[in-house]
Amino acid sequence: MPSSTQRRQVSVRTTPKLVPFLVGALALAFTVAVIVVYTTPQDPNYGTGASIGYMTFIFTMPALALAATAWLILEKVLRKRRTTYDIEPLGER
């Protein structure tokens, strides 16, 4: 049975979640695609939906790359900001 005076140190840090970054990038790519399609002259060979889909695909790749890069940079910055605590067991309950 461990002694009640036994202490340990633990490090606690915050980490950003990757999924909100990627979902935000997809939403931004779709929004930019809609703006580009509706502000440029329409081609009679392609429908509006097809144009929005294609432009969303084209804008998604760089948007996802930028979002992942931003997440990695934020992860690296937050990794340096950790807090260390001294803890000790409470004992039997």
Image (cartoon, rainbow, N blue to C red):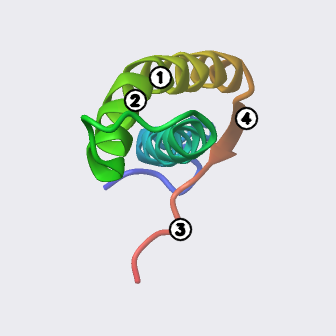
Q: What is the C-alpha distance between the residues marked 1 and 4?
A: 25 Å
Q: What is the C-alpha distance between the residues marked 3 and 4?
A: 21 Å
Q: What is the C-alpha distance between the residues marked 1 and 3?
A: 41 Å
Q: Name the image quarter holding the N terminus.
A: bottom left
Q: What is the C-alpha distance between the residues marked 1 and 2?
A: 12 Å
- Tell me which corner region of the image, top left, top right, bottom left or bottom right, holds residue 82: top right
Q: Residue 71 at x, y = what percent? A: 55, 26
Give left or right: position of 81 versus 70.
right
- For the residue labelled by badge 2, is the local secondary structure a helix, a strand or a loop? helix
Q: Amino acid at mark 2?
A: Thr
Nearer to me, 24 or 60: 60
Residue at screen point 70% across, 34% down: 84
Dot 2: within a 10 Å radius of its alpha carbon, few (fewer than 14), some, or many (20 or more) residues?
many
- Which of pointers 3 and 4 lies earlier in the amino acid sequence? 4
Q: Amino acid at mark 3?
A: Leu
- The residue singled out by tag 4 in the image is 83
- For the residue labelled by badge 4, is the local secondary structure a helix, a strand or a loop? strand
Q: Which mark is residue 60?
A: 2
Q: What is the C-alpha distance between the residues marked 3 and 2?
A: 51 Å
Between label 1 and label 4, give the one nearer the viewer: 1
Q: Are marks 1 and 3 in contact (CB under 8 Å)?
A: no
- Which of pointers 1 and 4 lies earlier in the amino acid sequence? 1
- The residue singled out by tag 1 in the image is 68
Nearer to me, 4 or 11: 11
